[in-house]
Image (tube, grey):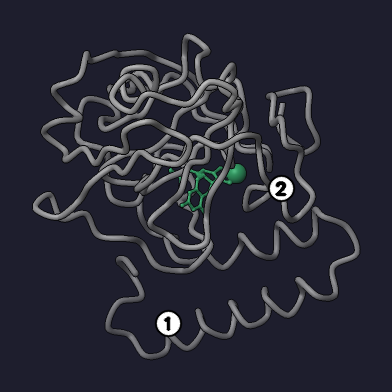
Amino acid sequence: MPDAHEGKPVGRAVFLTTVAAGVTSLLWGRGVWSRVSSAISPVESLVPLVPTGGWRIYTVSGSMPRFDPATWRLEVGGAVGRPAALDIHELRALPRVDQVSTFHCVTGWTVKNVRWGGVRIADVLAHVQPQPGATALRFVSAEEPYDDYLTMEQAALPDVLLAYEMDGKPLPREHGAPLRLVIPDMYGYKNVKWLKRIEVVPKEGTGYWEGYGYDQDAWVGHSNGYGT
Ligand SMILES: Nc1nc2c(c(=O)[nH]1)N[C@H]1C(S)=C(S)[C@@H](COP(=O)(O)O)O[C@H]1N2
Ligand SMILES: [Mo]
């Protein structure tokens, strides 16, 4: 847990109360919007004083995985001929892509012109021999139980990448270090942070926020939510 509240028993107590309230209202909430906003708001309350450049930092567990370059691996498995585990150096040795794109959260906030650096999913999958007939990918976060899915076609869109850099610097911890999924044509909830595993699967399952009623296909402007 970062910054302002660290070492302050009062702040910690307030946070826990807020989480308890959020979790309780998950049960009361009538619509998906009230459930989602009450689940997210405790996280926003964690980072009130940090300048975020328009970002809001989200977690579903209230804690952020810590990146250790010595032990971190991106596991790639599931319906593949040859599972792999890439360390950060192997990942960075893959062909690098750079792009500038706009990031939209389904709750309505947007960050324009984010500069991402990373690798294409296809270049990672080339290592593992996906079985023919597997139609989707599951992206698993080290922040349990967060995950989400893309179809193979969606994952192959030209502006989809696995990002290890943001705005010219290594991806910061709060944004998912060392690796996050970036799919600018879909809302933020598809952009899984703290990525630790990619599974090739026969078909899409239910991702974390889809379990609370959000659309499987999170196209910006063409799926449920408040964003534009
Ligand atoms: N592991 C994990 N990834 C996540 C989330 C999360 O809570 N946990 N929130 C998602 C949502 S809803 C959004 S809008 C973006 C927010 O990205 P940021 O925290 O870098 O601002 O992360 C997405 N990826
Ligand atoms: Mo979001």
Q: Amino acid at mark 2?
A: Glu
Query: Which residue is identified by label 1?
Result: 11
Q: Residue at x 48, y 36 (%)?
A: 79
Q: Which residue is mark 2?
A: 210
Q: Residue at x 47, y 14 (%)?
A: 159
Total labels: the figure holds: 2
Residue 27, x across and y down, in percent: 81, 75
Q: Quadrant of residue 31?
A: bottom right
Q: Nearer the viewer, residue 170 or 157?
A: 157
Q: Position of residue 88 (x, y in %)?
A: 16, 38
User: Which type of secondary structure does the marked residue at label 2 adopt?
Assistant: helix
Q: In the rendered image, which quarter contains the C terminus? A: top right
Q: Badge 2: how crowded within 10 Å, few (<14), some, or many (20+)?
A: some
In this rendering, is residue 202 above or below 145?
A: above
Q: Earlier in the sequence, mark 1 or mark 2?
A: 1
User: Which quadrant: the N terminus?
Assistant: bottom left
What's the amino acid at mark 1?
Gly
Determine crowd level at label 1: few under 14, some 14-19, many 20+ residues with C-alpha closer than 10 A: some
Q: Measured along the vertical axis of the image, is residue 223 above or below residue 175? A: above
- The residue depicted at 46 percent of the width and 69 percent of the height is 62
In-image side of 216 versus 70 (left or right): right
